[in-house]
Image (tube, rainbow, N blue to C red):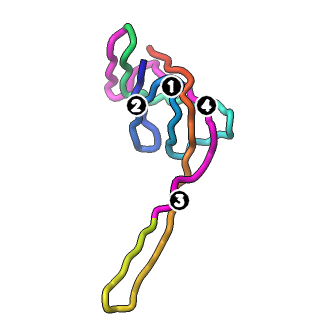
């Protein structure tokens, strides 16, 4: 069984025992997290359920593995012949979660 969830402005296709990195979610390592915005359920014996916009009563239960930061992204701007340049780095906060269970309606 799989589900499509929405978190941090992005959509992820998840299945049980899958590990993925999402936008920062509050919680320490080992904490349980529930994703209630389930857009679609599929692969089960009940067929495919598509929400409008979310499937009623469905949720995905996950466990926080760790809190970390994504690789650095460099933003570099240069204006030619002006001796003007700007370099900025950014590392996005992210949470690594392990999907424990998908609860359908």
Q: Name the secondary structure under disc 4.
A: strand
Reading the image, the residue beneath label 1 is 60
* Disc with the residue nearer the chain's start (1 vs 3): 1
For the residues labelled 2 and 1, the Cα–Cα distance comes to 11 Å
**Which is closer to the viewer, label 2 or label 1?**
2
Determine which quarter of the picture holds residue 13. top left
Q: Position of residue 5 (x, y in %)?
A: 42, 31
For the residues labelled 4 and 2, the Cα–Cα distance comes to 16 Å
Query: Magenta segment: does it hold 99?
Result: no
Reading the image, the residue beneath label 4 is 63
Magenta part of the chain: 46-73
The label on residue 13 is: 2
Query: Magenta segment: does it hold 68?
Result: yes
Residue most toward the top?
A: 45
For the residues labelled 4 and 1, the Cα–Cα distance comes to 10 Å
* Disc with the residue nearer the chain's start (4 vs 2): 2
């Amino acid at each position: 069984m799989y589900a499509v969830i929405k978190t941090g402005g992005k959509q992820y296709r998840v299945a049980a025992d899958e590990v993925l990195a999402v936008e920062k979610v509050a919680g320490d390592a080992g904490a349980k997290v529930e994703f209630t915005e389930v857009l679609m359920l599929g692969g089960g014996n009940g067929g495919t359920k598509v929400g409008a916009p979310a499937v009623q009563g469905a949720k995905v239960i996950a466990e926080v593995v760790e809190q970390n930061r994504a690789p650095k992204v460099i933003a570099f701007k240069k204006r030619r012949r002006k001796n003007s340049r700007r370099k900025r780095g950014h590392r996005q906060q992210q949470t690594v979660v392990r999907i424990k269970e998908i609860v359908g309606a």
